[in-house]
Amino acid sequence: MRLCTPHVRVRRIWTVELRPQEGGTVLVCPQCRPGPLPLTAGSARSAVLAHLAQHARRDVLPPHLRICQCRERGCRWHPRHRGCAGAVLLVLMRAHGGRLWRLADACAACAAATAQAAVVPDALLPSAAQPSTAPRPPRRRAGSRRPGTDKHVRVKEMLTYLAAALPRFSSPTARLLALQCALRADGRGRVGLPDGFLRGIRLASHAAPWHELEHAAWLRCTGRQHGSLHAQILDAAILHQAPGRQERARAAHWALHPTPLAAPHGAPPSIQLAALALAVHTRNTEASTDLDDLTRLTATAPSSLEDLLDQLVRARTLSAWRHDNETGKICWQLPPAHG
């Protein structure tokens, strides 16, 4: 007698491939018909992310039924590690120089061990995945907070997403700019940054980071109006963020001065990004995280990251740091004044 389960098994793994063909690049998805979708070179990355997001919103599964798809395939997507562990997350992976993209459920241990991978926050896949007949949640009182809406979490989630969504060669300045644009955008992906704000973050006279983001087809500058520079974000996943705009704006403001681990005034963008990557993991005077996490968020090699950490120690932003070779973690301490 064969037992059956009342749950239909949903295959929570989606893969798309970018194939160059005569006349332009096409997007190939084995799960979609008809055939390949023609793309322009500039829109390929955004189209991939939007297509994968559509699959994830359609194939919703309760958390207790989700399994590590990496483990189901013999953990072939990463080097050997100590085994599957942790919560099941939605992970975006890139391979073959950006020609192959995969979105799949994977445990936290497999996600951390996979190269060129980033966790897709639940905030980027909100109620669009829910049935339209779902009852509207009750309104919260002003000042009330939902679980998991801390500014550290918002910034960490967005940095993690941008680590996969932006090209590997994107500069620290472009990454910091993309973070501010993503968190400050409205529901249609439109963002306006006042000239005074751009002067404050030392970007008023720098066009290079904007050009980087435009070249990556992540945003498009739409002009200057009423003392502000306006842009349209082209990354479809950014259009579906949660929570609300005010809370995201508070997270964006904190990211400029991430106490208690803000970079020194006038520090170069690489130092600012490194300090921010540490700050999102810091809740006490002593903190730690995996080396792979920091190199992914800062888009830098381990040797370069060590130099950045040394500079933060010399600037007295950190008291000390060390690399635990046994666990693979970077550990750091804040100066006593932060205690």
Image (spheres, rainbow, N blue to C red):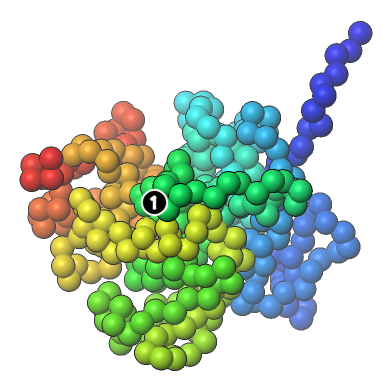
What residue is rendered at 28% in x and 68% in y?
A: 269
What residue is rendered at 64% in x and 74% in y?
A: 43
Q: Residue furthest left?
A: 337
Rendering quarter of residue 172: bottom left
Asked whether residue 273 is in view, the answer is no
Quadrant (top left/top right/bottom left/bottom right) for the N terminus: top right
Q: Nearer the viewer, residue 193 or 20?
A: 193
What residue is rendered at 89% in x and 12% in y?
A: 2
Disc 1 target residue? 143
Quadrant (top left/top right/bottom left/bottom right) for the C terminus: top left
Please state the horizontal and vertical placement of residue 195, each as a whole percent of the image: 33, 85
* As drawn, 299 above or below 267: above
* As drawn, 88 above or below 209: above
Q: Which residue lies furthest to the right in this view?
A: 1
Asked whether residue 123 is in view, the answer is yes
What residue is rendered at 30% in x and 78% in y?
A: 197
Please state the horizontal and vertical placement of residue 317, each as a whole percent of the image: 14, 53
Q: How crowded is mark 1: few (under 14 residues within 10 Å), some or many (20 or more)?
A: few
**In the rendered picture of this protein, how many numbered marks are placed on residues?**
1
Q: Nearer the viewer, residue 75 or 56?
A: 56
Rendering quarter of residue 20: bottom right
* As drawn, 44 above or below 54: below
Residue type of the residue flagged with mark 1: Gly
Would residue 326 appear left or right of 36 to someone viewing this image? left
Q: Nearer the viewer, residue 145 or 93?
A: 145
Q: Which residue lies furthest to the top in this view?
A: 1
